[in-house]
């Protein structure tokens, strides 16, 4: 009986990760961190290409750092990023989503000192951080936070 309890205890983390991964798949998020439902607003290239586009178009750059196992990340995708007014705001910037645990995402998460998920940053076209939003934000709060960050950019 003790052996069965030990095996069950050891399998719980595996089952938890599998369940979270399945939820991420069900939500339409791919392993690369793209938001399929709103793909038109999300820049699909590399970080370097996104920054080059931000410089060329004189736009701010928005990066959503997330992971495949993060429930608040999926909630942000489903409840906030799916809203038309949020999509309009994201389309005004070069917006990308990065899986912080992917080979390309790990060095960027380290560079910008990302310590939790979701963590969103807004960059000036030269790559300098202008502002940061941590955790799940409902649409109205997200838009208010972006507006405050934009005010800093216009000074």
Image (spheres, helix red, strand yellow):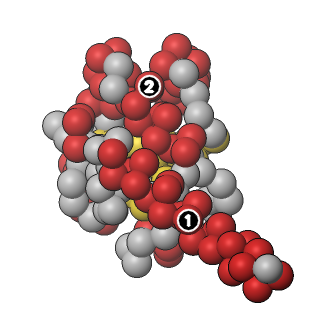
Pick the residue in front: 2 or 64. 2
Q: Residue 125 appears at what percent x and percent y?
A: 37, 48
Residue sitting at x 68%, y 73%: 8
Asked which quadrant contains residue 4, the reply is bottom right
Residue that label 2 marks: 79
Q: Residue 134 appears at what percent x and percent y?
A: 63, 41
Residue sitting at x 67%, y 59%: 115
Task: Identify the residue at the far bottom of this view.
Answer: 3
Earlier sequence position, callout 2 versus callout 1:
1
In the rendering, which numbered label is found on residue 147?
Answer: none
Between the C-alphas of marks 2 and 1, the distance is 26 Å
Q: Quadrant of the N terminus?
A: bottom right
Pick the residue in front: 45 or 28. 28
Task: Identify the residue at the far right of this view.
Answer: 2
On the rendered structure, is 101 left or right of 12?
Answer: left
Residue that label 1 marks: 15
- Label 1 CA crowd tier, 10 Å (few <14, some 14–19, many 20+): few
| Count of numbered circles on the image | 2
């Amino acid at each position: 009986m003790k052996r069965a309890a030990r095996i069950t205890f050891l399998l719980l983390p595996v089952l938890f990760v599998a369940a979270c991964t399945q939820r991420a798949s069900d939500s339409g998020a791919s392993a690369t961190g793209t938001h399929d439902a709103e793909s038109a607003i999300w820049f699909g290239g590399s970080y370097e290409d996104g920054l080059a586009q931000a410089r060329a178009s004189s736009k701010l750059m928005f990066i959503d750092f997330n992971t495949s196992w993060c429930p608040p990340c999926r909630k942000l995708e489903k409840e906030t990023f799916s809203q038309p007014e949020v999509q309009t705001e994201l389309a005004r910037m070069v917006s990308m989503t990065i899986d912080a645990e992917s080979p390309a995402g790990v060095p960027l998460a380290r560079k910008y000192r990302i310590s939790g998920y979701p963590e969103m940053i807004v960059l000036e076209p030269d790559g300098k951080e202008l502002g940061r939003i941590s955790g799940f934000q409902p649409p109205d709060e997200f838009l208010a936070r972006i507006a405050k960050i934009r005010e800093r950019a216009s000074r």
